[in-house]
């Protein structure tokens, strides 16, 4: 079972020919609103890949909350998602014709999510606790420390990049970063941005995703590199979250690190070929049968 402590958002998506420059106004070819947030995306990706997932987070008492919870309530245990007086978290996403995106996030109710919503009993039962950096940093830090006292393994997607103390990151079992986040982390640590260098500097597991170049990991002395699958990208918005969620689900089922990374890469590739945030995330049978 996977416990996800993370953000739950409503995404406002605009389809543009080109991402605008500062001071520039562009006309969108279309727009839509759908569920998103790194925590919710990753929880849904894990659930769609067959995992039993419990979501811990917060939304507002507003019209955006039903949008943000639309997919989770069907596929994930959201009984511990609380209501806040703050507005539901939201993101404004612009996507160009090459599938590239630019995103601004308003945390809103996500900052009200409390780590004590993850009861001790859940930490005794869970195999993995999945976290990102779109909630209050203090709550994330508290949960990392708590998880370290239980058999459950922690996965921290250090996204967006935020500086945490080295001794805290040491407590995380697997830190997942993309290329930009790896650069930021390596700058703070004074090392190279490779998974191996970051892992050695932190003395813990690190996995780095590299977009079209694939992904690499250095975890418990095991070095793994997988290639990205070549696809025509339509929308990369949720690809990274899809990778993280499916990786967690595969590890939860007992797959090896190599097999889990390959499966996560396949699912992320599928997500890239589809428009949308959560709507792009494949189900288990789709990933099983895709080639």
Image (cartoon, rainbow, N blue to C red):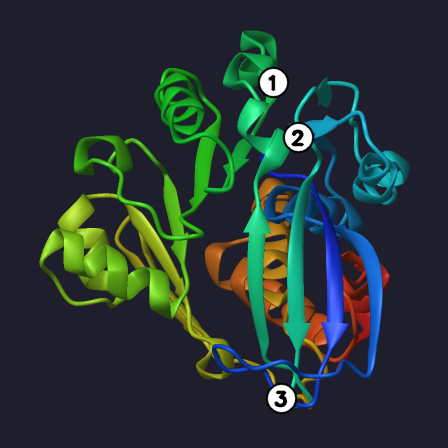
Dividing the picture into quarters, in which one does residue 54 lie? top right
Dividing the picture into quarters, in which one does residue 289 lie? bottom right
* Residue on which the image places disc 2: 1
Residue 18: give its label. 3
Q: CA distance from mark 3 to mark 2?
A: 41 Å
Mark found first going from the N terminus, 1 or 3: 3
Classify residue 195 as left or right of residue 49. Answer: left
Work out whether 12 lies above or below 291. Answer: above
Work out whether 270 lies above or below 91. Answer: below
Question: Residue at coordinates 66% horizontally, 60% vertically from top-left?
Answer: 92
Residue 125: give its label. 1
Question: Of residues 250 and 64, which is closer to you in this image?
Answer: 64
Residue 6 appears in view: yes
Classify residue 200 as left or right of residue 101. Answer: left
Most distant residue in the left direction: 190
Closer to the observer: label 1 or label 3? Answer: 3
Closer to the observer: label 3 or label 2? Answer: 3
Work out whether 241 lies above or below 211. Answer: above
Q: CA distance from mark 1 to mark 3?
A: 47 Å
Q: Secondary structure at mark 3?
A: loop
């Amino acid at each position: 079972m996977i416990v996800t402590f993370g953000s739950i958002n409503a995404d406002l998506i605009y389809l543009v020919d080109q991402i605008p420059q500062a001071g520039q106004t562009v006309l969108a070819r279309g727009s839509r609103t759908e569920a998103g947030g790194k925590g919710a995306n990753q929880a849904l990706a894990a659930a769609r890949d067959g995992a039993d997932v419990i979501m811990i987070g917060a939304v507002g008492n507003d019209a955006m909350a039903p949008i943000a919870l639309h997919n989770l309530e069907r596929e994930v245990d959201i009984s511990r998602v609380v209501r806040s007086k703050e507005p539901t978290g939201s993101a404004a996403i612009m996507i160009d014709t090459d599938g590239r995106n630019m995103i601004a996030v308003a945390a809103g109710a996500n900052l009200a999510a409390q780590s004590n919503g993850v009861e001790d009993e859940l930490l005794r039962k869970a195999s993995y606790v999945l976290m990102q950096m779109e909630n209050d940093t203090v709550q994330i830090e508290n949960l990392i420390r708590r998880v370290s006292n239980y058999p459950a393994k922690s996965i921290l997607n250090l996204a967006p990049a935020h500086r945490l103390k080295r001794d805290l990151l040491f407590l995380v079992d697997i830190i997942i970063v993309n290329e930009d986040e790896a650069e930021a982390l390596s700058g703070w640590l004074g090392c190279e941005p490779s998974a191996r260098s970051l892992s050695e500097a932190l003395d813990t597991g690190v996995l780095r995703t590299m977009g079209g170049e694939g992904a690499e990991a250095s975890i418990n002395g095991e070095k793994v590199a997988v290639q990205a699958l070549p696809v025509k990208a339509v929308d990369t918005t949720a690809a990274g979250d899809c990778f993280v969620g499916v990786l967690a689900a595969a590890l939860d089922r007992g797959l090896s690190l190599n097999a889990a990374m390959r499966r996560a890469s396949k699912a992320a590739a599928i997500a890239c070929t589809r428009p949308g945030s959560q709507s792009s995330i494949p189900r288990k049978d789709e990933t099983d049968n895709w080639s």
